[in-house]
Image (cartoon, rainbow, N blue to C red):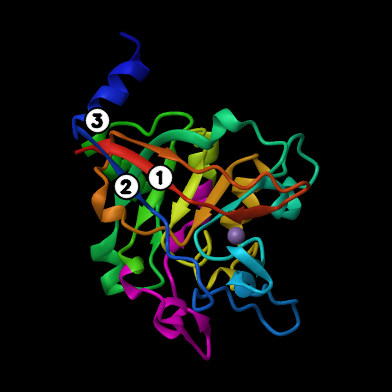
Amino acid sequence: MSSITNLLADLAAGKIKVVDLTQPLGPATPVIDLPPIFAPSPGLTISEISRYDDKGPAWYWNTLTLGEHTGTHFDAPVHWVTGKDLPNNTTDTLDPASFIGPACVIDVRAEVAQDPDFLLSIEGVKAWEAQHGQIPAGAWVLLFTGWASRGNDKAAFLNADAEGPHTPGFHQTTSEFLVKERDVLGVGVETIGTDAGQAGKFNPPFPNHGIMHGAGKYGLASLRNLDQLPPTGALLIAAPLKIVDGSGSPVRVLALAPA
Ligand code: MN
């Protein structure tokens, strides 16, 4: 039997579960707030084309308007200026084989509960590896912060004050380590973006975006249900829409994990 035959048999037998890591996508889904000097990315608006009525008696469908980076979404390397000249860096040209990889889930809920500006350090990664093994090349590294429990409440989710948003992320040196020493596929977070809330003030600003995308790596934001994944042993699938010259897209992120 091939491994796919075995996988399908295990799925049918309930030995493997499919975990949906996706936030529901609706008009209330929070989107990132940038300082007003920058152009904002719109959230989702839905307008009905027809719903079994005069405009379409037997069919229902909608028109969507949204920024590419809305809700649970994929960041392609071209999203950041550091990745703009890489080959095959857009949603339509990325290698589809790279949308699938092992998930390494790093639980930092306790640290984030103490400090919403928590940044994962290299030491934190190595402590995780001492317990769970080295992060393999081509892995998705998922930062399990517990942030998804804040739901669709924009104020709680963005957690901003006069200083700007306070949400966790990766220390710049950690992003460099994950790229250079672990050759990850990318990183995924529960928050609105793959950089910490205060990262606009870091030097350089938004270092995780700059480092990951400059190295051709990906980002996943606004993930849910990371509590349903083991630290290792799950397979993650995150395939963006094949938007021509797209910088990212909303995505249905699925994980296969032992039941
Ligand atoms: Mn994004």
Q: Quadrant of residue 96?
A: top right
Of discs 3 and 2, which sits in the foreground? 3
Q: Residue at coordinates 38% horizontally, 66% vertically from top-left?
A: 118
Q: Residue at coordinates 62% horizontally, 67% vertically from top-left?
A: 57
Q: Is residue 219 above or below residue 92?
A: below
Q: Amino acid at mark 2?
A: Val
Q: Residue furthest top?
A: 1
Q: Residue at coordinates 48% horizontally, 48% vertically from top-left?
A: 187
**Relative image position of residue 242 (x, y in whole percent):** 68, 44
Q: Quadrant of ligand 1?
A: bottom right
Q: Is residue 139 magenta?
A: no
Q: Which residue is mark 1?
A: 254
**Relative image position of residue 43 (x, y in whole percent):** 60, 74
Label 1 near ligand 1 (CB < 8 Å): no
Q: Residue furthest right?
A: 85
Residue 12 marker = 3
Q: Which residue is mark 2?
A: 19
With 32 as the anchor, is 126 left or right in this view?
Answer: left
Q: Amino acid at mark 1?
A: Leu
* First along the sequence among labels 2 and 1: 2
- Decide: few, some or many residues near mark 2? Use Cα within 10 Å; few <14, some 14-19, many ≥20: many
Q: Secondary structure at mark 1?
A: strand
